[in-house]
Image: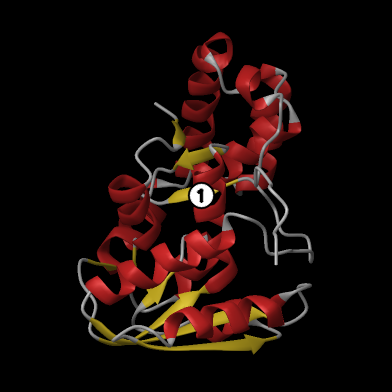
Amino acid sequence: MSLQVVKRGYVPKDQTEFGEAWKARMDAAANDVRYLLDHGYPVSPAVTFIGNHYLLSERQRMALTRGLASRERLCARRKKELQSLSGTVSVDGFNTVITLEVALSGSLLLGCDDGTIRDLAGLHGTYRIVDKTVRAVELMLGALERSGADRAVVFLDRPVSNSGRLKALIEEKGSHRRLAVDAELFSDVDRQLSGRPQVVTSDGVILNRCGGWYNLNRRIIEESIPEAWIYSFH
């Protein structure tokens, strides 16, 4: 079956809005947002206020929201970051696969303050398997196999379209590996992953609530997709 060729997460304006012409303004905005976050302001009103001041687009504001966090929150996340895995690991499936699809597409990624790499693709309840999906799944499973884990349980959002197809693909690709692989559908993936000791995700809400997390996507992208476009704030 041929799959549609898609540049996951591609937005034409990104070349301009995250290019050199905007870099100084974006960095200044990021520093101002960090200041407000460090002084207890919630991220949404902080980004709205600073975004209005610097006349930022909605996508630029989304990048600030996704990429930044207070020093207190960053410290808490770093303390829980794992350098290796063992036993069973819980994987935030769509979060991981979509970011890798975006990286393989050459679309915009964010190098975030907490060390994760996040995308701005947005799921919004819809997903389809594209030409980058198989490679993304293979990269994910290969990296998990090398991480020291014995078993990976991939958590997928049941309400998202084609989640069943992605589950079948992951299990089919996992059946050929030494790593034991299961994919499960849940209506509440964020809640299911909260408190678990070994979680693969870059989702900030889950990072705040899990017992420990592993920065799998950064490892994969740095090792296997070095050409990926990663935008970082200074």
Q: Compared with residue 124, is residue 34 higher up or lower down, i.e. above or below?
A: above
Residue in view at x 46 percent, y 76 percent: 91
The image quadrant where one finds the C terminus is top left
Residue 140: % across, % down? 41, 67
Disc 1: CA contacts within 10 A as few (<14), some (14-19) or many (>=20): many
- Most extreme residue toward the top is 21
Q: Compared with residue 228, is residue 74 higher up or lower down, i.e. above or below?
A: below
- Describe residue 156's horizontal placement relative to residue 83 as left or right: right
- Asked if residue 3 shows in the view, the reply is yes
Label 1: element kind: strand
Q: Compared with residue 116, is residue 139 higher up or lower down, i.e. above or below?
A: below
Q: Compared with residue 79, is residue 155 higher up or lower down, i.e. above or below?
A: below
Task: Please state which of residues 112 and 163 is positioned toward the viewer in this rendering.
Answer: 163
Residue 24: % across, % down? 50, 13
- Describe residue 28's horizontal placement relative to residue 223 as left or right: right
Residue in view at x 58 percent, y 37 percent: 107
The amino acid type, in three-letter code, at marker 1 is: Arg
Residue where numbered disc 1 is placed: 118
> Which quarter of the picture shows residue 129?
bottom right
The image quadrant where one finds the N terminus is bottom right
- Describe residue 105's horizontal placement relative to residue 80 as left or right: right
> Which quarter of the picture shows residue 166?
bottom right
- Asked if residue 213 shows in the view, the reply is no
Residue in view at x 78 percent, y 79 percent: 159
- Most extreme residue toward the front is 1
Residue in view at x 29 percent, y 59 percent: 78
Residue 186: % across, % down? 66, 87
